[in-house]
Image (spheres, helix red, strand yellow):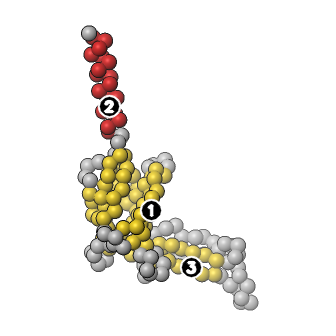
Amino acid sequence: MRKCFVTVAFLLLAIQGVVSAAEMTISLELFDLNTQKPINNVLTTITLSSVKEEIAQSSKYITSNVLAIKAQEGRYEMTLRADDLETEGKDYFLKEDLEVGASSSSKVYLYGAGSISGTVMDQLNNLVSNAELKFECAAEYGEQRPMKTDKYGSFSLQYAPAGRC
């Protein structure tokens, strides 16, 4: 009888572990930080990372301002990009911590973003490969800025702080 009780207790603990590791669905309501208006009709890309590694990345076109994602319970660094495909350049960016578990929905406010690209040429209009670049931005959000041009003298910065570089 005691052996049966220990076995049942072990099975209950194992089931509880499986349930706690199950995926949860979280709804993120997207808003523009400056205008406070809902962000919709955009292609979103979300990346969830733990301290050690990238856990998941997915892209999804949303017509409403609600983005539903699935993740296991825990704490993540979330990078969220949103692009209105009818405009040139990229449109919104957010990088912040996300706690999965306590609440199934959350309002998130994204920063306005833009894109910068170009080429570096010398006085004779020759392309300059590996030219050092320096971006001076009044805001510290967005993607990592390129340090040099590529072998063709080109550079590109997606999701730069809108109006601040």
Nearest the eye: 53 or 17: 17
- Classify residue 75 as left or right of residue 88: left
What amino acid is labelled 1 in the image? Ser
Q: Residue at x 26, y 9 (%)?
A: 1
- For marks 2 and 3, give the one nearer the viewer: 2
The residues bearing labels 2 and 3 have C-alpha atoms spaced at a distance of 53 Å
Identity of the residue drawn at 49% across and 67% down: 143
| Residue at numbered disc 1 | 59
| Kind of residue at badge 2 | Ile
Which is nearer the N-term, disc 1 or disc 2? Answer: 2
Q: Residue 37 appears in which quarter of the rendering?
A: bottom left
What residue is rendered at 35% in x and 42% in y? 22
Label 3: which secondary element: strand
Q: CA distance from mark 1 to mark 2?
A: 32 Å
| Residue 108 percent location from the top left of the image | 31, 65
Element on which disc 2 rests: helix
- Residue 40 visible within the image: yes
Residue 66 percent location from the top left of the image: 30, 65
State the image quarter where residue 84 is shown.
bottom left
Does residue 133 appear left or right of residue 59 in this picture? Answer: right
Is 79 left or right of 12, judged from the image as shown?
Answer: right
Find residue 119 and report its horizontal and vertical position in percent: 63, 81
Determine which residue is flagged by label 2. 15
Residue placed most toward the observer, 113 or 17? 17
Count neighbours of disc 1 (C-alpha within 10 A) and say few if under 14, some if 14 to 19, many if 20 or more.
few
- Categorize mark 2 by other alpha carbons within 10 Å: few (<14), some (14-19), many (20+): few
Asked whether disc 2 touches disc 3, contact meaning CB atoms under 8 Å apart, the reply is no
Front tag of 3 and 1:
1
User: How far across and how far down the image is residue 145, in percent?
Assistant: 54, 70
Q: Mark 3 = which residue?
A: 117
> Tag count in the figure?
3
Type of the residue with mark 3: Ser
